[in-house]
Amino acid sequence: MNIAIIYYSMTGTNYQMAQWAAEEARSNGDHEVRLRKVKETAPMDVIKSNDAWKEHYEQTKDIEAAALEDLDWADAIIFSVPTRYGNIPSQLQAFLDTTGGLWSKGKLVNKVVSAMTSAQNPHGGQEATLLSLYKSMFHWGAIIAAPGYTSEELFKTGGNPYGFSTEGGVDNLNDQSKTSISHQVKRTIDIAERINK
Ligand SMILES: Cc1cc2nc3c(=O)[nH]c(=O)nc-3n(C[C@H](O)[C@H](O)[C@H](O)COP(=O)(O)O)c2cc1C
């Protein structure tokens, strides 16, 4: 399978989640995996005015940006993005808004997709953010591989059936988060394999 892990992160949380997802996807050795960041669109003066944002921006500036070709190439796509007032970040929306050409040729049909998110607060919009993203995926004709309650492990990280989610930033991620993320990745790949048989 060709697996694209596409993330956006301002302060590193979703970057870590995406890295763990890529690690899991690579672990069985059979899959091609691309870790891609969503291109930053915020003005540089705004980024520079926030120390944590600036530091993360610098730290990840060499990571390849997601391109339309990555979507075309992928059998499965795992997104990881923070919430923005219960919605996806505008950076990802801007990228999705460039997919009309692929969509019109039917190139996004049957992509197996799954998503993860983070927020500052436990009820800060995790579920709403994932559902916002999945709404666009329905328009693609994608197959959504949500984790549901397919593993006992998921109950230990908040039991979000739409996708792994966390609150409170990168310091709040732990081994249990990694376990839940791994489960979601394995399930996404398993469904992609069934679809592409
Ligand atoms: C413009 C903006 C809007 C945000 N909206 C919310 C929100 O509605 N609820 C919430 O809990 N956190 C909100 N946050 C906090 C981020 O979701 C949180 O910092 C993020 O999950 C950290 O992920 P990252 O480290 O990958 O950037 C917001 C942050 C920004 C910058």
Image (cartoon, helix red, strand yellow):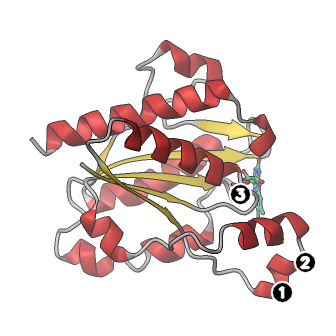
Where residue 134 appears, as percent x and y from the top left, is: 43, 51
Is residue 162 placed above or below 43 in the rendered structure? Answer: above
Would you say 90 lies left or right of 3 here? Answer: right
Q: Give neighbour class at mark 1: few <14, some 14-19, many 20+ (Cα, 10 Å).
A: few
Q: Nearer the viewer, residue 103 or 56?
A: 56
Q: Which residue, given by chain and number where applicable, does mark 3 sit on?
A: 85
Mark 3 C-beta to ligand 1 under 8 Å: yes
Helix, strand or loop under label 3: loop
Residue at far left of view: 197
Please tell me which residue lies in front, 26 or 66.
26
- Residue sitting at x 45%, y 28%: 183
Q: Quadrant of residue 4?
A: bottom left
Tell me the amino acid under the disc marked 2: Ser
Q: Which residue is located at x 55 percent, y 26 percent?
A: 179
Q: Is residue 181 shown left or right of residue 11?
A: left
Q: Is residue 160 visible?
A: no
According to the picture, the residue beneath numbered tag 1 turns out to be 45
> What residue would you read off at disc 2?
49
Q: Mark 3 is on which residue type?
A: Tyr
Residue 51: x and y in percent read 90, 68
User: Residue 106: where, in percent of width, then height?
Assistant: 17, 69
3D distance between C-alphas at marks 1 and 3: 22 Å
Assign a secondary structure to mark 1. Answer: helix
